[in-house]
Amino acid sequence: MSRRMLFIEPQFAIAPDWVSRRQQDLVALTKESWSGIVARPSPDDPDDHVTNVRGQWTVPAVVSPKNYSGFYTCMTWVGIDGYGKRDNLRGQLLQAGTFQYGDGCGTYTSPWWEWWPGEYAKTIHNFHVGPGDVVFCSISVHSPNTAEIYMHNITTRIATAFGTLAPGDGVVIGNTAEWILETNQENGRPQVLAQFGDVYFDQCLAYTRNRKWLNSGQGDLLNQTDVNGEIIATTSRLTDHPFVVSYTAEP
């Protein structure tokens, strides 16, 4: 007999400053710091918008790049909107996932979410995730300024869900759905990407206002580059839903 799933009431805390995009310019939110896939509703239906995105991934065990002893990080998440100014003129980004980071004292993993801009990123400090855990995440937009986030640690069979209201006059437009592994940026400057090996994403689906399904196989692949333009994380499609992001920087 399998164990029953346990639902918990989430307890939030303000995430470290480097997680939040609050002080970042929208120009930083481009494919150079993102690897993964971004999908869009059909251009033949301009009134259609993404209202739900979901996906799961295996939380990576990160290590420091070779000959580096400072701070390093990577973030894995699903999101709606935020993919550059061209696709989202109003600049909203609703996202949720896990961030992995390390320093000279150890490595750490935490679940987090953010409705950017206008509010600091928040961690869910009583929802434990660790390397090797399979995490499922879903974001559902109920109106332009209200949404629900659901997170499930499939490995531990613990789940949580909560509603959120857009900060200020923010809205989600629904121009894009994203499944991303990212090197975060602080004040517009990229941080050091952790060595993460391969991260496998699966169950990558999005749903639109006009009741159409999108999957990651219909999206564009993004490869992450460093400040010199060299590819450091490569995205490879497996089938319509699964894909893998691989660390390709010099170890």
Image (tube, rainbow, N blue to C red):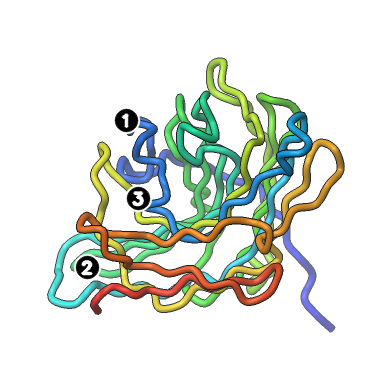
Q: Nearer the viewer, residue 65 or 223?
A: 223
Which disc, if any, is residue 105?
Answer: 2
Quarter of the image for residue 250 reads: bottom left
Amino acid type at image mark 2: Cys
Amino acid type at image mark 1: Gln
Q: Secondary structure at mark 3?
A: loop
Toward the bottom, the furthest residue is 1
Q: Please say if 103 is above or below 52.
A: below
Toward the top, the furthest residue is 169
Percent of width and height locating residue 153? 63, 65
In the rendered structure, the answer to whether residue 71 lies left or right of residue 95 reads: left
**Residue located at (23% from left, 73% from top):** 65
Instruction: Return the residue at label 3.
Output: 184
Q: Earlier in the sequence, mark 2 or mark 1?
A: 1
Q: Quadrant of the C terminus?
A: bottom left
**Residue located at (46% from left, 32% from top):** 85
Percent of width and height locating residue 31? 42, 50
Q: Earlier in the sequence, mark 3 or mark 2?
A: 2
Percent of width and height locating residue 164? 64, 32
Percent of width and height locating residue 198? 46, 77
Q: Quadrant of the N terminus?
A: bottom right
How many other residues sit within 10 Å of disc 3, few (<14), some (14-19) or many (≥20)? many
Q: Please say if 62 is above or below 51.
A: below
Quarter of the image for residue 167 reads: top right
**Residue located at (69% from left, 68% from top):** 241
Which disc, if any, is residue 247?
Answer: none
Q: Secondary structure at mark 2?
A: loop
Instruction: Return the residue at label 1.
Output: 23
Amino acid type at image mark 3: Asn
Q: CA distance from mark 3 to mark 1?
A: 13 Å
